[in-house]
Image (cartoon, rainbow, N blue to C red):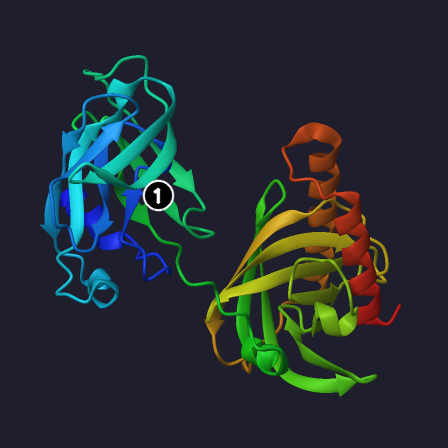
């Protein structure tokens, strides 16, 4: 009865208000155990349904259909229904006619597809339909022996779309101390103290320091290189004595970021490595510190190690995540624009 009630509740009154009645189910394609349903105003006599040339079957009348009350000029008790196993008709094209005291008032044509028999037992199974009814939704369907068809057994709606970082305040939202972590062969964590937003050559840039006291700059990709197809909002350039490090990333929360890491030549003008997945965590909302920067000699050592590991990884000595040519070109272009090369 729950199936019948749910179908009756969703039936739509036709726009032709003067129609005496309508057969709403079956229509188009149907299978398994379902209903015969519709409305007739007023249902004065005995209502029946006839499939093809078979013996007419009785319909229950007087079912509450408040949506028909205005058209029929009564309380709305104008619905009719019956339960029927459509597989009994066999595969193919069929006709259903409805009668009031033997007088036909509507007809529908429909197609039936069955699973080889009129009633299947011992079957089980379920599957998930992705992006239904909306993008990102997941709807699970499970076989029902009683209904001889699949029913919705679970629904996982898509979560809200992440709110993009507002453009005008995006850079200011990055101010603080960040740890960027990535793995070539070893795992490296680079700390950046991003301090203040300034205008340079007409661009709003966020400046800060790396752990060696060297200046770094962060820009919004579309500000630095309008129309770029690089799929990240921000890019950070960290010039070093041997290599220039680049990070392209998106914020995924107030203290988190994800993106890619790549190495460039010392002038930050040409990419010299593949890209490696990067995660960022803001460990403090302040970028000011009294810590003494690590010595520049340490920067040389680390840059040499990073470069050596990259060459080893990309010569097949370790697994890596390759960058496609388009991404490499786009990242190089944005880095050149950011660093003025």
Q: Say which quarter of the image contains residue 121.
A: top left
Quadrant the C terminus occupies = bottom right
The one of 164 and 292 positioned closer to us in this rendering = 164
Circle 1 SS class: strand
249 relative to 79, above or below:
below
Where is residue 1? Give x, y as percent: 11, 42
The one of 147 and 67 positioned closer to us in this rendering = 67
Residue 160 as seen in the image, left or right of residue 166: left
The one of 42 and 66 positioned closer to us in this rendering = 42
Q: Which residue is mark 1?
A: 139
Q: Residue at x 49, y 69 (%)?
A: 163
Q: In the current view of this chain or complex, which residue is farthest to the right?
A: 341
Residue 65 seen in the current view:
yes
Q: Residue at x 75, y 32 (%)?
A: 315
Residue 202 as seen in the image, left or right of residue 276: right
195 relative to 102, above or below:
below
Q: Is disc 1 surrounded by few (<14), some (14 to 19) or many (20+) residues within 10 Å?
A: some
Q: Residue at x 69, y 48 (%)?
A: 306
Where is residue 155? Give x, y as percent: 30, 47
Residue 166 as seen in the image, left or right of residue 149: right
């Amino acid at each position: 009865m729950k199936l019948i009630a749910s179908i009756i509740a969703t039936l739509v009154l036709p726009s032709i208000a003067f129609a005496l009645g309508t057969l709403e189910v079956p229509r188009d394609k149907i299978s398994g155990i379902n209903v015969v349903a519709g409305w007739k105003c007023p249902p004065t006599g005995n209502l029946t349904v006839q499939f093809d040339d078979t013996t007419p079957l009785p319909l229950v009348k007087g079912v509450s259909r408040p949506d028909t009350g205005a058209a029929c000029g009564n309380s709305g008790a104008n619905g009719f229904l019956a339960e029927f196993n459509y597989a009994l008709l066999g595969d193919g094209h069929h006709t259903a006619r409805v009668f009031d005291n033997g007088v036909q008032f509507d007809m529908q044509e429909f197609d039936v597809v069955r699973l080889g028999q009129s009633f299947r037992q011992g079957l089980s199974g379920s599957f998930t339909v992705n992006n239904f009814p909306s993008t990102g939704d997941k709807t699970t369907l499970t076989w029902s022996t009683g209904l001889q068809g699949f029913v919705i057994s679970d629904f996982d709606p898509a979560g809200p779309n992440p709110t993009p970082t507002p453009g005008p305040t995006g850079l200011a939202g990055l101010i603080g101390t960040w740890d960027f972590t990535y793995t070539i062969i070893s795992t490296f964590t680079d700390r950046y103290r991003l301090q203040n937003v300034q205008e340079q050559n007409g661009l709003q840039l966020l400046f800060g320091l790396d752990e060696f006291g060297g200046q770094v700059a962060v820009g919004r990709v579309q500000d630095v290189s309008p129309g770029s197809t690089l799929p990240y909002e921000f890019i950070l350039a960290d010039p070093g004595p041997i290599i220039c490090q680049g990070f392209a990333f998106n914020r995924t929360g107030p203290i988190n970021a994800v993106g890619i890491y790549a190495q460039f030549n010392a002038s930050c003008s040409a990419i010299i490595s593949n890209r490696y997945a990067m995660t960022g965590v803001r460990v403090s909302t302040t970028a000011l510190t009294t810590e003494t920067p690590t010595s520049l000699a340490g920067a040389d050592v680390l840059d040499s190690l990073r470069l050596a590991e990259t060459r080893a990884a990309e010569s097949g000595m370790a697994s890596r995540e390759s960058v496609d040519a388009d991404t490499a070109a786009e990242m190089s272009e944005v880095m050149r624009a950011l660093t003025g090369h």
